[in-house]
Image (cartoon, grey):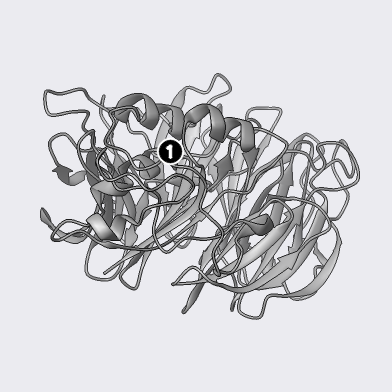
């Protein structure tokens, strides 16, 4: 059985707690300094707020640097960026990309690049707030969506050069579907020169280089696109009123390469990997139909032997299912899929396991369990699986690597206890480990009121390294 965890933040906060007195974020906003401004004028800091222990508090109006109370073996905090003050509460802030010497974060109506010391490399203002963004970029360029003229519309599109901080083109998304140009609940996926767009009541495919629409062929009148997933290749899931459904892969030019017909009564609910193609199925009552691996020729490769265990990759809240590929905590290589199990209570603390499945046979190859730790697969690096161990009640998280055959994980970064609470509060976030650095970028911020009621200065982004 596959249980998809849609609201990661609530689950993590409920389990880990944030009021044990050992956190780092009971401080006042940073005092003004000469540092370049963060989003909307806020100042990034060299390290997160106040040290992890209650006797390491900063003077009134200042933030202490957790690097000053760093314990032996703990990673260094490269920088931490505060969330902007927004009049709205519960605002999604999608969009985070890692480049060679900087990272790029979208927040509200701004896209900002930060060097690894937290200073701005560039910033770009958009006409309205960013409301959707793909995870993948193409040659350093990504198409993002911003709010349109209508209420709840997400119809503005712009191609952003992530290295130069320049807007290459900017225009409205194509109309189409039952509700024309509404574009509410937009999901996006990018691969090569293609971007798939799916929204409540419509869909489209465009080119990255010029934003022009690509027509891969019309679906029958009784069928509609459920969503896309990108990365190495572009996949599209669709379903019809007669209970049939399909998964299709496109060529770089936007032509259909293959079509896999899903067994009747089920449709694709999530795409965990585009290549290899691995998808979760569900019926109209959202009952799980299992997890399938599809070959590069569009044939069934295997059905994963999940048994009675529940698995909980962390997927963004997606009311209409249009953000098809928006799941973290799941990773794949050419022959293996890594899934985290459901949370189980224990004397040492809540625990999840990671199970590795052979994509050719569907059988489980091995399992990883760390007592008292919740585990999240981040990806692979050619040497093994990169795993994020979430923080516990008494300590910070960690980034580890597990070899292809499983076994004891090797530690890459031990995150400091001083920023444990920041990790917990950044539960709804994108996490990336790249070139020895670990980034946690918020996908949703509470706004000024939410930060005040939590007793913490809300963070947008935190970076760790050695």
Q: Position of residue 432 (x, y in %)?
A: 40, 59
Above or below residue 454? Residue 366 is: below
| Residue at left offset 70%, top offset 70% | 160
Can residue 443 be spotted in the picture? Answer: yes
Q: Position of residue 332 (x, y in %)?
A: 35, 56
| Residue at left offset 37%, top offset 44% | 423
| Residue at left offset 41%, top offset 37% | 26
Number of marks in the image? Answer: 1
Residue holding disc 1: 425
Residue at far top of view: 285
Q: Position of residue 254 (x, y in %)?
A: 69, 67
Above or below residue 162? Residue 419 is: above
Compared across the picture, whether 165 is left or right of 285 comes to right
Query: Along the line of sight, which residue is nearer the eye, 299 or 121?
Result: 121
Compared across the picture, whether 377 is left or right of 115 comes to left
Residue at far front of view: 59
Query: Along the line of sight, which residue is nearer the eye, 418 or 266?
Result: 418
Compared across the picture, whether 70 is left or right of 280 comes to left
| Residue at left offset 59%, top offset 69% | 36
Secondary structure beneath disc 1? helix
Query: Along the line of sight, which residue is nearer the eye, 437 or 168?
Result: 437
Placement of the C terminus among the 4 image quadrants? bottom left
């Amino acid at each position: 059985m596959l249980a998809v965890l849609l609201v990661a933040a609530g689950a993590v906060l409920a389990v880990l707690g944030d009021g044990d007195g050992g956190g780092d974020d009971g401080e006042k906003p940073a005092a003004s300094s000469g540092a370049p401004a963060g989003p909307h004028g806020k100042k990034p800091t060299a390290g997160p707020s106040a040290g992890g222990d209650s006797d390491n508090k900063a003077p009134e109006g200042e933030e202490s640097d957790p690097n000053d109370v760093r314990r032996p073996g703990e990673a260094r905090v490269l920088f931490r960026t505060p969330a902007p003050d927004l009049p709205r509460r519960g605002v999604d802030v999608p969009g985070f990309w890692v480049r060679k010497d900087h990272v790029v974060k979208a927040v509200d109506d701004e896209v900002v690049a930060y060097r690894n010391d937290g200073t701005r490399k560039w910033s770009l203002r958009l006409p309205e707030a960013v409301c959707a963004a793909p995870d993948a970029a193409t040659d350093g360029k990504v198409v993002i969506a911003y709010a349109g003229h209508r209420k709840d519309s997400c119809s503005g599109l712009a191609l952003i050069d992530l290295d130069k901080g320049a807007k290459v083109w900017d225009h409205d998304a194509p109309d189409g579907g039952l509700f024309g140009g509404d574009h509410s609940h937009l999901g996006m996926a990018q691969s090569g020169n293609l971007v798939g767009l799916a929204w409540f009541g419509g869909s489209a495919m465009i080119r990255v280089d010029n934003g022009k629409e690509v027509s891969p062929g019309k679906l029958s009148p009784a069928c509609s696109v459920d969503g896309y997933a990108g990365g190495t290749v572009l996949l599209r899931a669709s379903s019809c009123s007669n209970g049939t459904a399909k998964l299709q892969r496109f060529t770089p030019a936007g032509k259909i390469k293959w079509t896999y017909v899903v067994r009747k009564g089920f449709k694709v609910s999530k795409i965990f990997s585009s290549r290899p193609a691995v998808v979760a199925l569900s019926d109209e009552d959202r009952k799980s139909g299992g997890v399938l691996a599809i070959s590069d020729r569009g044939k069934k490769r295997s059905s994963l032997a999940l048994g009675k265990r529940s698995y909980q990759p962390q997927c963004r809240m997606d009311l209409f299912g249009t953000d098809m590929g928006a799941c973290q905590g799941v990773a794949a290589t050419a022959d293996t899929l890594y899934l985290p199990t459901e949370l189980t209570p224990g004397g040492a603390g809540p625990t999840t396991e990671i199970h590795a499945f052979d994509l050719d046979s569907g059988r489980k190859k091995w399992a990883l369990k760390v007592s008292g730790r919740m585990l999240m697969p981040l990806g692979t690096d050619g040497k093994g699986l990169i795993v994020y161990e979430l923080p516990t009640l008494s300590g910070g998280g960690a980034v580890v690597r597990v070899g292809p055959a499983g076994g004891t994980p090797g530690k890459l970064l031990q995150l400091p206890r001083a920023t444990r609470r920041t990790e917990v509060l950044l539960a709804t976030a994108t996490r990336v480990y790249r070139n020895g650095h670990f980034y946690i970028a918020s996908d949703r911020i509470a706004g000024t009121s939410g930060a005040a009621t939590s007793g913490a200065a809300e963070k947008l982004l935190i970076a760790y390294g050695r």
